[in-house]
């Protein structure tokens, strides 16, 4: 199958980036979300993305005009998928919400439509039966700022048709991604399997008062040559995500360190609106965080 019409369900942090990136590479993209108010917010975010594509990819005004023309919007699910070759789901990271979405989607999507979840923590096998088409269902996971950090992790589940898997690998390449096929299901894929333990270790060092944020980041940046330390990364990912992961672990295990981390993130950051890069302050202040200072690594 050659994909032409793509539907992106969910216009949140990653959803709107996936839609824009796909439209930028010449595909017809319909952005679906639960109501028109949410979709209006997505449209305004596309203006910001245009500036990023200009700065980082040297995108021309004509390319950005074409991208806008390739995008359309609807809050009617049946209308959103009526011609879809591929639907990419980027709805909230909550199993109940995803299952409900797939059950509704299964009733209105054409037989040809392939479904891909962008979930970063949940396995596709959890939803395969809810889709009503397990052989045409798999995961396609992107990293934040996908136009720059252009990874696309493709992960099937036991019932995924190998041909569908290969078609998705080709699609990922067609939208400018580095396609990264996984041979079996893995919670957190490759990126998060590597990243989450790093961020978790950094938060443990911080909460146990072993060292301050700047020293922990400086250690990582100097020792490995990485452009960001773990707290710089946490500001990009968003403090809310870090809180949610630690709160879930704290509730499940009652680990006193995780409880302490969750409480600290809530009281010192979330309650004060310090959510990271998106709000102008998290562990650092933006647009000029301390780790970008020329003397930071001395």
Image: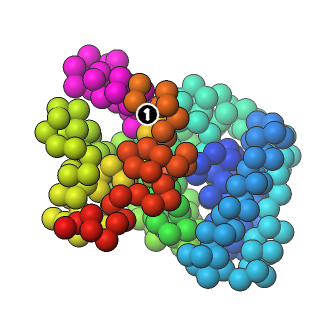
Q: Position of residue 83 (x, y in %)?
A: 81, 56
| Residue 92 picture quarter | top right
Is residue 83 depicted above or below 294 in this figure? above
Helix, strand or loop status at disc 1: helix
Name the residue rendered at 66%, 80% in the picture: 59
Name the residue rendered at 26%, 46% in the picture: 213
Which quarter of the rendered picture does the N terminus lie within? bottom right
Q: Most prominent secondary structure in the magenta stretch?
A: helix
Q: Name the residue under label 1.
A: 269
Who is closer to the viewer here, 38 or 123?
A: 38
Q: Is residue 243 magenta?
A: yes
Residue 215 visible, this angle: yes
Q: Position of residue 110 (x, y in %)?
A: 77, 48
Position of 209 with respect to 280 (left or right) is left
Q: Does the magenta stretch include residue 172?
A: no
Q: Position of residue 58 (x, y in %)?
A: 61, 82
Who is closer to the viewer here, 162 or 79?
A: 79
Who is closer to the viewer here, 246 or 127?
A: 246
Name the residue rendered at 69%, 68% in the picture: 50
The magenta segment is 242-266
Q: Position of residue 291 (x, y in %)?
A: 33, 60
């Amino acid at each position: 199958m050659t994909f032409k019409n793509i539907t992106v369900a969910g216009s949140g942090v990653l959803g709107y980036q996936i839609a824009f990136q796909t439209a930028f590479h010449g595909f017809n993209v319909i952005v679906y979300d639960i109501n028109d108010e949410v979709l209006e917010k997505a449209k305004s975010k596309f203006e910001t993305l245009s500036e990023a594509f200009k700065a980082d990819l040297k995108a021309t005004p004509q390319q950005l005009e074409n991208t806008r023309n390739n995008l359309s919007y609807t809050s009617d699910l049946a209308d959103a998928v009526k011609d879809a070759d591929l639907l990419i789901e980027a709805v909230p990271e909550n199993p109940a919400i995803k299952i409900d979405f797939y059950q509704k989607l299964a009733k209105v999507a054409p037989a040809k439509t392939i479904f891909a979840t962008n979930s970063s923590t949940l396995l596709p096998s959890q939803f395969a039966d809810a889709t009503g088409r397990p052989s045409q269902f798999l995961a396609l996971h992107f990293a934040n700022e996908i136009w720059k950090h252009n990874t696309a992790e493709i992960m099937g589940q036991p019932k995924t048709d190998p041909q569908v898997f290969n078609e998705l690998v080709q699609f990922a390449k067609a939208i400018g991604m580095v396609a990264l096929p996984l041979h079996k299901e893995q919670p957190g894929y490759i990126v998060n399997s590597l990243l989450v333990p790093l961020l978790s270790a950094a938060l443990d060092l911080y909460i146990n008062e072993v060292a301050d944020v700047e020293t922990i980041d400086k250690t990582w940046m100097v020792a490995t040559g990485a452009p960001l330390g773990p707290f710089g990364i946490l500001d990009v990912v968003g403090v809310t995500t870090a809180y949610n992961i630690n709160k879930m672990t704290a509730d499940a295990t009652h680990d006193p360190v995780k409880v302490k981390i969750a409480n600290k993130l809530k009281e010192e950051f979330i309650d004060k609106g310090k959510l990271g890069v998106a709000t102008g302050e998290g562990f650092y202040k933006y647009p000029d965080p301390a780790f970008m200072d020329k003397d930071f690594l001395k």
